[in-house]
Image (cartoon, rainbow, N blue to C red):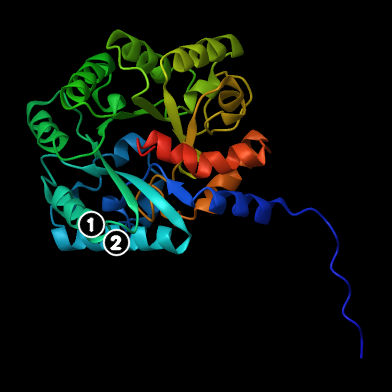
Amino acid sequence: MTKAPAKPKFFNPKPVLLDKIKARGGWVNAHSHIDRAFLVTEENFPLSIIDCKEKWDYPDQWKGKASVQTIYENMVACIENLLEQGGQALGSFIDCDPIIKDKSLQAADRVKKEYKGQLKLRFIHQPIKGVIDKEARKWFEEASSFVDIIGGLPERDNPRDADHLDILFETAKKYNKMLHVHVDQFNDPAQHGTELLADKTAEYNYQGKVVAVHSISLAAQPIKNRQKVYKKMLDNGIMVIACPMSWLDPKRSEKLAPLHNAVTPIDEMVPAGITVGLGTDGIHDFYKPFLDGDMWIELYILSEANRFRDLDALADIASTNGLKVLGIT
């Protein structure tokens, strides 16, 4: 009988990293949109390649018809998936706008009650219609008292990004809540959303309560600009959430920028002292039909794209830092 060959001896960092994450309490998905999960269909799948800004309104046709029960079931599926992976906490943006109205809020309220004690949940409002339009502002205000964290999308109100941020900060201060803001999503050197967010944080004296979600375009800036923004972020206690798989697909461009991968530049942020958490963003939705909420894949891609190999720092990003950006610890 042929003897099975001995397994090669080598250092496999994956189980070591997974053990470190487990020792820190487990995975934290700090950024997702679980009320809009599972929106991809065979019919709309070919359209998932359209520009992100065009996609912002595409879910409306589903949102108008969706029941609270359907939204609740989508949320539960995402939560169960994270629990199966050993998750300890989840942060999710939820829509509240003239189309879906308060249906996602109702579903989120039910989910919070059902999973109390099983998973730490934090819900953040997604003002997908902006906050400048009168009707959109009405629903933004409706959600602000319910959500745990105020959320923002300044690019939706472009070129009035600064006005959008003023409304976010005024609302966050009114309710004494943290603020999570989508910024610099398009891997475009012309975007300066992270720096604007840092400046507004200083203006409103809201240090330590603000989180930048994505901050990808920052990597497209010259190093002098990046270092200037990192200092502003650090001075104002701005934290970051990276969702590497969700933004690997910006369209090819002839714009000139430093060579880089289209992910949050944690290889520079972490050494600079900036707290970084990890998220999945969409899960099987129209934006990202292939993404399934696998936290390991997200962390692996974040590490590879940045050539970042500090296992303890990666474990913190996947766990304890996520708690920090969600205001849990």
Residue drawn at the location 36% of the way across and 50% of the way down: 47
Q: Residues within 10 Å of mark 1 (few under 14, many from 20)?
A: some
Quick one: which residue is furthest to the bottom in this view? 1
The residue at the point 27 percent across, 32 percent down is 151
Percent position (x, y) of residue 234? 48, 17
Q: Residue furthest right?
A: 2
* Callout 2 amino acid: Val
Q: Nearer the viewer, mark 1 or mark 2?
A: 1
Q: Is residue 274 above or below residue 315?
A: above
Nearer the observer, 36 or 19: 19
Name which quarter of the figure residue 44 lies in: bottom left
Image position of 230 with respect to 107: above or below: above
Find residue 328 and report its horizontal and vertical position in percent.
36, 39
Question: Secondary structure beneath disc 2?
Answer: helix
**Quadrant (top left, top right, bottom left, bottom right) of the N terminus:** bottom right
Residue 148 or residue 143, whichever sits in front: 148
* Residue 37 appears in view: yes
Q: Is residue 251 left or right of residue 34?
A: right
Question: In the picture provided, is 4 more to the left or to the right than 317?
Answer: right
Q: Which residue corresponds to mark 2?
A: 76
In the rendered view, would you say 183 is above or below 6?
above
Circles 1 and 2, Cβ within 8 Å, touching? The answer is yes
Residue 181 figure quarter = top left
Residue 319 is situated, as x and y percent measured from the top left of the image, at: 49, 44
Q: Secondary structure at mark 1?
A: helix
Question: Residue at point 68% right, 35% down?
Answer: 307
Give the quadrant of the C terminus: top left
Residue type, mark 1 in image: Val
Residue 254 makes an appearance in the image: no
Task: Give residue 111's mark.
Answer: 1
Horizontal and vertical percent position of residue 162: 27, 14
Please give the name of the residue rendered at 31% of the width and 48% of the height, measured from the top-left corner: 121
